[in-house]
Amino acid sequence: MSKPRSLFEKLWDGHIIAGLSSGSALIAIDRIFLHERTGAAALNSLAEAGRKVADPSRVFAVMDHIVDTRPGRSDQTLMPGGQAFITETRAASAAAGITLFDVNDPDQGIVHVISPELGIILPGCTLIAPDSHTCTQGAFGALAWGIGSSEAEHAMATGTVRLSKPKSMRVIFGGKLRTGITAKDMILTLLARYGAAGGKGHAIEFAGEAVTALDMEGRMTLCNMATEFSAMSGFIAPDETTFRYLKGRRYAPVGQNWDKAVACWRHLNSDPDAAFDQEIIINAEEITAMVSWGTSPGQSVGIDGTVPDDAPAAALKYIALQKGETIKHIPIDAAFIGSCTNSRLSDLRRASALLNGKKVAHGIKAICVPGSSQVKRDAEAEGIDQIFRNAGFEWRESGCSMCFYAGGESFAAGSRVISTTNRNFESRQGPGVKTHIASPETVVASAIAGKIADPRELTNG
């Protein structure tokens, strides 16, 4: 009788080509995604070495990281020299014969949003991209992780990468979430309890009743921040929710091939009695609305909580808070909804439902950036854009935008921002900007109040 295997073991075993003397392994790569900030460098380096992309049909590129998100955009960006990144990626992609989702392509968007939208990511696949949040796509029962440009070059030329096998971890969210609590609150709870280094060296399977109850977009939010937990990747076993989401997507199998694929995908789960190097169990019923207070995603607390007494002095100095200070009611200067974490249609629907008929507080700069051009079109078809505009939010084109500051657009120096992004590092959203990460609902409630606020109180009138 065969040994019980975890989902990670099945994904690993299905892609290992050979063990190497270094202790690492050669892993087959099914999909490669590039973006304009580093894509041209990898493609041009490959060409200069006299090598070609082994299978151009498996490689995709998109303009998302530094592209301007203001209406009427072009190749020009606010990042000094940014236009060259775009034009060079465009030329290199054409020369290599790979698929490019250009600046104003109807399928353009953040890589981790458009890949699922188009069915490029599929259960059982390996997918890599030069972006640490590639683990988002593990939500589909895939092994997806971020790499460097040199690894992307190697993968394009050979269809493989070298990888040291991580340890395995299972994080179980048992029970049901309370009303108004989201996947963002789940992952921030994990980070707050176990620290930003809690998953270091591990590939993490998220499981449990609260996880399977999430829709695919919630699952993507959960897996997105596995990298904030220092994990190599995060993933969730595919199920009927996964299959319903993928069916009919452009790059998904069709006809008999779809039926055969689903039959195979149903085996992508952890066997009973499968062993894990570590297991964490969290009672989902205990999770509350969460918000970060410091300069690491692990420095988060329930919205009714306070800055902990053991808070590091450096974090307190930067974020300009005191030990024991109440998180709720801290005044803010700006609010941001966007990023690969929380910019999908369901995120915008939930946020707009709270925002409808209300106004952003006086003096608050509020911006909403859809995660893809498709999300933007769908939201506009439902009138969501008008709700945001009427409330005082700017409504943008899709892209990474102010998730991170790369010398381009940012919030005002030293301002305090509540944001649906995934990182609150020092100056992540601009020089001296103080970022509090939270769910879309919490960001909307805070924008309306002009201070950090509990969205459940807004719902209760």
Image: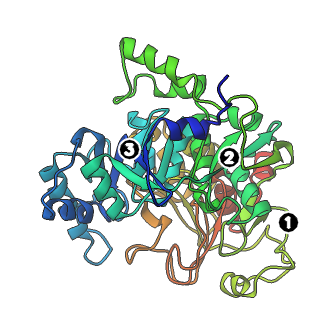
Which quadrant of the structure image shows residue 20?
Answer: bottom left
Q: Is residue 47 left or right of residue 200?
A: left
User: Where does the image place residue 343, in percent across and percent down from the top left?
Assistant: 51, 50
What kind of residue is marked 1?
A: Gly
Which quadrant of the structure image shows residue 301?
Answer: bottom right
User: Where does the image place residue 29, in percent across and percent down from the top left?
Assistant: 38, 44
* Separation of marks 1 and 3 at Cα, in angstroms: 44 Å
Q: CB atoms at circles 1 and 3 under 8 Å apart?
A: no
Q: How many marks?
A: 3
Tag shown at residue 183: 2
Q: Nearer the viewer, residue 375 or 428?
A: 428
* Separation of marks 2 and 3 at Cα, in angstroms: 29 Å
Image depth: mark 1 or mark 2 in front? 2
Q: Secondary structure at mark 1?
A: loop
Residue assigned mark 1: 305
Tag shown at residue 29: 3
Q: Residue at x 74, y 52 (%)?
A: 455
User: Where does the image place residue 359, in percent across and percent down from the top left?
Assistant: 62, 57
Q: Residue at x 72, y 63 (%)?
A: 291
What kind of residue is marked 2?
A: Ala
Q: Nearer the viewer, residue 450 or 78?
A: 78
Which badge, 2 or 3, is on the more N-terminal residue? Answer: 3
Q: Nearer the viewer, residue 354 or 311?
A: 311
Q: Is residue 346 visible?
A: no
Which badge, 1 or 2, is on the more N-terminal residue? Answer: 2
User: Where does the image place residue 330, in percent across and percent down from the top left?
Assistant: 75, 73
When the figure is inspected, residue 273 is found, relative to residue 440, above or below; the finding is above
Q: Residue at x 35, y 59 (%)?
A: 151
Q: Is residue 170 left or right of residue 384?
A: right
Q: Residue at x 47, y 61 (%)?
A: 22
